[in-house]
Amino acid sequence: MSWSRIWTVTRTDLKQLIQAKDFWIPMLILGGIFFLFVPTILLLSITAIGDVQAVAQISQALEVLPERAQAAVRGDTDAGRASYALAVYLFAPVAVVVPLTISTAVGASTIVGERERGTGEFLAHSPAAVKEIYLGKLIASLLPGYATTLLGFGIYSMVVNLIVGPEVGGWFFPTREWWVLMLWVVPPFLALTLSIVLRLSARVKSTAAAQQASGLVTLPLILVAYSQSTGALFGAASASLWIGAVAWVVALAGLSRGMKVVTRARLLGVADGI
Amino acid sequence: MLTGQRRPADGRGVDAPVVAARALGRRFGEVDALSDLNLSVPEGQITVLLGPNGAGKTTAIRMITGALNPDRGEIRTFGVDPGDEGEDVRRRCGVVSAKPALYDRLNGWDNLAYAAELYGLRDYDERLREAAARFGIEAALQKMVGGYSTGMKTRLALARSIMHDPDLLLYDEPTSGLDPESSHAVLELIRSMTEDGHTVVMCTHLLLEAEGLADQVVVLEDGTDLISGTPKDLTDRYWPGVVVHMDAEQPDMLDRLAHAGGVIAYQRNGVAELQLDDLGRVPDLVALLAAAGVRLTRVEPRIPTLEDLYFAVRDGRAAFAEGNTLGGSDLAARFDRKRTAPSLNDLSEVDP
């Protein structure tokens, strides 16, 4: 297997994606909504209105959190504690939803799109191994979602520290759990989802069908990732590491199976069932 | 380098075909794309796969590179099974498919560079420029392919097919969608490929396109090869004699030629059509008619074309299926059939 050819496939797919402004502009807006606009408005509102009754109630609601999580919440005022909890715990699942949404949209059309455009014929006749094409396209699907998330994570960290930091005694974000979430938990969930999406993309007849089917399949995965990422932040220190480890194992198994589904016959669109 | 000596024929042995296929079959669902294809592609020549849409031409190309495997039968490309050693085989092939298979959201240069990297070329800038220049597309390399005309796309696809200096070029209906002028230019470029020592396999359903280009013709129908050989061998096989058309101011006087020496078959339906054992008989026949006071208005030797051949093969196959065989006396019927038969394009329109 040639990593140079895998990177060639990845780079070419990404180059085409960059040309598709009609695709990446909505995706940037999506990232902006989740990582910038909503947190900014929500956190600014809480810190600006101060210790009113509503904020006090949010602060009291934190008592439902596990003891470890409660102990980690910083801040001397209701506004400080509420905004800290929202910044650290409420938006954690967003870090999963955004990359899954973007990468699913990219991955859904990756194989079937080659077939629809007729370029699958070029790939099928090229010396590139099917595994190289599959991995190249997987990485090309994964990178936009993950890169957007990392960028959003950076922006979100700035927003949180600038708005909530003064309330809780200084910059505090990202917390250790968030680092683990971003670097250990999110990638395998992304890989697992894409392994399924690429399999669908190889099997269906059109990009529209691939996107419909991917939406159906990835919705439960988004929910699982959502709950697991929240749990990873609430749970014991080792919980997120275990969740990530299990996700990696499942993801690698999914990728291994997905690799076998992409064949030259499917790139050509002549496999039985297409 | 795009030109120069081809690489030796590796393990195939001297004069071994570049592609050899025996009894190839491939089924897609309920449809037999190939049912019994036999193929031998000689080195350094242009082999034309001729047949209507759905005859199995594209499937044959795909099996030559190993992009598809046969359900039954055997195929060897460069002496090896492309199903087992596909990467090596594909590295030595250049393919242009019926749709140019280019990326509209990349410019011409990036399309070529993508292929160059997949084919493992290093420091390929000069090769890319050379290939693009050969097909007259170098000025458009920085433009997005989505804005190219069909002719430009075909030229870019042709440039892409040769830049890694392949031994075998596989062109699947390369003039599809082109205007006559562009088609002619593309066919000239394909012809020039064999001058560099390349072996070319070209699929077409256009008989005129194959005429004058093919060193070898393989007529396909329903996934089977009906006949194969050089155009001259094939026309000699189907028309062992010479056909001459004659007309006169008194056409009924031509009928006396029916029993003249050297005339194998005679028929008059407006114009007289004679099958002769030798073209040298014509002056004798003209003299005979002149002596009888016949004023000739037309004497035209009829050289069979690939189109004649194609329909003769089809008719012969139909006759064979009905338990009959066609002899030399059926020549006129073959020509008449050709005149009234639908074109291949018409035939393709009724394909399932």
Image (cartoon, coloured by chain):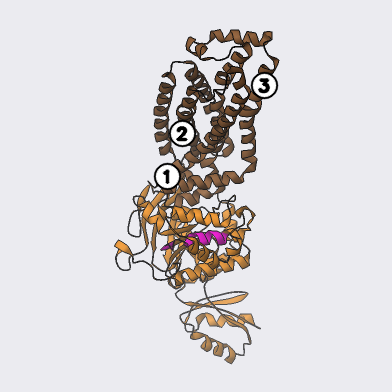
Q: Tell me if label 3 and label 1 are in contact, CB under 8 Å.
A: no
Instruction: Measure the C-alpha gap from mark 2 to mark 1.
Output: 14 Å
Which stretch appears magenta? Answer: B154-168
Q: Tell me if label 2 and label 3 are in contact, CB under 8 Å.
A: no
Of tags 2 and 3, which is closer to the observer? Answer: 3
Residue neighbourhood size for the residue with mark 2, other residues' Cα within 10 Å, grouped as few (<14), some (14–19), many (≥20) = many
- Horizontally, residue B237 falls left or right of residue A104, namely left
Instruction: Measure the C-alpha gap from mark 3 to mark 1.
Output: 48 Å
Asked if residue B308 shows in the view, the reply is no
Residue B74 x %, y %: 34, 53
Q: Earlier in the sequence, mark 3 or mark 1?
A: 3
- Horizontally, residue B127 falls left or right of residue B293, namely left
Q: Which mark is residue A132?
A: 1
Q: Which mark is residue A195?
A: 2
Residue neighbourhood size for the residue with mark 3, other residues' Cα within 10 Å, grouped as few (<14), some (14–19), many (≥20) = some
Chain letter, disc 2 residue:
A
Residue A18 x %, y %: 59, 44
Q: Residue furthest front?
A: A169
Q: Secondary structure at mark 2?
A: helix
Q: Which mark is residue A44?
A: 3
Q: Secondary structure at mark 1?
A: helix
Q: Earlier in the sequence, mark 2 or mark 1?
A: 1
Residue B38 x %, y %: 38, 58
Of tags 3 and 1, which is closer to the observer? Answer: 3
Image: A178 above or below B119: above
Question: Which residue is at the front of the view, A69 or A235?
Answer: A69
Hue used for the chain lettered B: orange
Residue neighbourhood size for the residue with mark 1, other residues' Cα within 10 Å, grouped as few (<14), some (14–19), many (≥20) = many
